[in-house]
Every structure is written in C-alpha cells, then in structure tokens.
Amino acid sequence: MESSGTSVGRATLLIVVSALSFGSISVLTVLTTSAGVSLLTAMAWRYVVGAVLLGAAAPIKQIRSLPRQRIIQLMLIGGVGQALITYLSLHALEYIPVGPLAFLFYTYPAWVALLAAVRRTERLTLIRVFALVLALVGVTIMVGTPTEKLNPVGVMLALGSALLYSVYLPALERVQDGIPALLSTFLLIVGAAISFVAAALLAGELFVPRGTAIWSNIFLLALVSTMIAFSTLIKGLSVLGPVRTAIIATVEPFFTAILGALVLGNQFGAATLIGGVFIATAVLVIEWSSTRIMASA
C-alpha cells in the first residue's frame, strides 16, 4: 500500500506532466493554423481524435454502471466549460496582446484559493498563501505586467476565462470523484468534441485537412495536449484538490516559453528563467507542505 507522502509526490508529478502537456497547445496550434487550418477546425479534430484515442484506452464498458447524471455532468463540463474557457481566451486576443492575456489568465490560482476559502472546502494556510504569491510573482516576471492601457473588453474576457477556470477545477474534482481517470477524461473530451464540431459546422469551417505535417500536429494535440493532459490532471486533482493543483499548474507558461523558443524561435530571456525559478520554488513548497501534513495526519 502506498504511503501518503508517495501519493502526494506522485500527484504533484502528474499535475506537472499535465501542465507541460497543456503547455504544448499554443505551439502546436500555431503550427497547425499557420498551415491554413482554422482554429475551430483544429480544435474540432483535436478533440475528435482525442476521443478516439481515449475510447481505445478507457474502460468504456464501465459507462453502463455510471449514473446518467454523472455522465451528463462530465460531458457538459467538457462541452460547455472547456469550450467557453477556450473561446473567452481566444476572443480576448482580438483586444489585448498575448502577454497581458497570460498575466490576467494566470491569476486563476488566486481565484481558486479564494473560492475554496469562501466555500470552506480547503484551508488557506500561510504556506499555501506563500506558495501562491511565489507562483503569481513568477508568472508576472515571466510574461510582464501590462503597462499600457488595455482594452477593457479584452481585460474582462481574460479575467472571465480565469474566473471560469477557477470554477471549472472544483467542479471537475467533484464530478469525477470515484470514476476511473481515463473514463472521466473520455466523457469530458467527447463533450468538448461535440461542441467544437458543432461550432465548426455552424461557422462553415469544418473540413478534412491535408498534409502529413498538419495531421502530425493534430495527433500530438490529441495525444499530448488532450489525452495525457486531461487524464493526468484528473488523477492529480483527485489527490491534491483544486488549490494545490492550480498553484502547481503555473509551470505551464514556463514550459510554453521554452517550447516556443525551441520550435517557433521565440525569444527566451532572463525574465523567463527567473520567473521559472519562482514557479518551481512554489511547486516545491506545495509538495513539501502537503507531504508533511499527510505524514503527520
């Protein structure tokens, strides 16, 4: 039987893997859309292929034993929650640059912690506050604070996506409880696939892309940024809860910056490295404090 310390350590690693997997989305999406594939089409195929991959790996037969309400809830979280978060973030880019968007979106760990404290589902300890501040400082250093006057519509959209994500994480933790991670992920992704396919059809943008390179990027989006990202998120979230998960997941922009520099030739400066150190320290503080609490319980 696993010790509690081992369980927390493994869950922390799973959230890091999830964040790294999610961190590849923007780079792979840029590679796909720059090849002439619309964003809606890219996301539709990402989730359709992801659903097929998960359908082959998940214990699909167990769906029959699940309450219909739980199935519908997971599909709605994927089809409505995930789709809205994506839409709000992407729509915000029409009004504000990427840097301010990232800064505003990655305030979500603070909203998650505040929401948990208000609902009294998780205690907001001094160590968690310290780790949260470290993570937010790291993200701020990495992407830079918005110094220019920003369009209020873009700011509202970016903050809206962050607030929605802060509700999305606790809801996902509650609904998937007791369901195998791969099965929960499958239902989540099927819901997202239905929404994006419907949106692409309504927009008249759904088509079958051509080219090995495009399909390679779509496959990586489905495998890494969807199947691996969501399944590891759900596994880690079930152990750590939304507050610790949100803080640890702030490693995502650091990995995105590294991947962008390697694949797209984006600039990788000292600010990114320093911000990454702050975020890594926050993750270590959370893992240490969680292990200590579990060991003394």
Image (cartoon, rainbow, N blue to C red):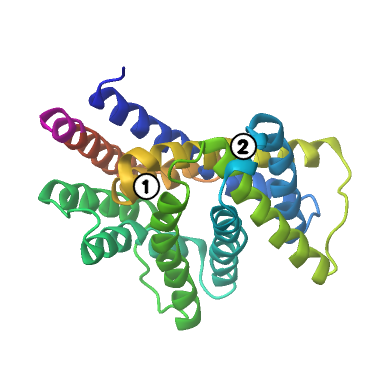
Assess whether mark 2 and mark 1 are in contact (beta carbons under 8 angstroms): no
Residue 261 in view here = no
Per the rendered image, the range of residues in magenta is 291-297
The span from disc 1 to disc 2 (Cα, nearest Å) is 33 Å
- Disc 2 marks a residue whose amino acid type is Gln
Q: Is residue 238 above or below residue 190?
A: above
Image point 59% across, 65% down: which residue?
Answer: 80
Q: Looking at the image, is mark 1 or mark 2 nearer the viewer?
A: 2
The prevailing secondary structure element of the residues shown in magenta is helix
Quarter-of-image position of residue 36:
bottom right
- Residue 170 position within the rendered picture, expressed as x and y whole percent measured from the top left: 38, 56
Q: Residue furthest top?
A: 1
* Residue pictured at 26% horizontal, 43% vertical: 278
Q: In this view, which residue lies farthest toward the bottom?
A: 152
Q: Which mark is residue 218?
A: none
N-terminal of the pair, mark 1 or mark 2, is 2
Q: Amino acid at mark 1?
A: Thr
Q: For residue 250, which numbered disc appears in the image?
A: 1
Query: In the image, which disc is placed on residue 62?
Result: 2
Image quadrant in which the N terminus is located? top left
Give me the residue at 51% from left, 62% from top: 98
Label 2 crowd bin: few (<14), some (14–19), many (20+), radius 10 Å: few
| Badge 2 element | helix
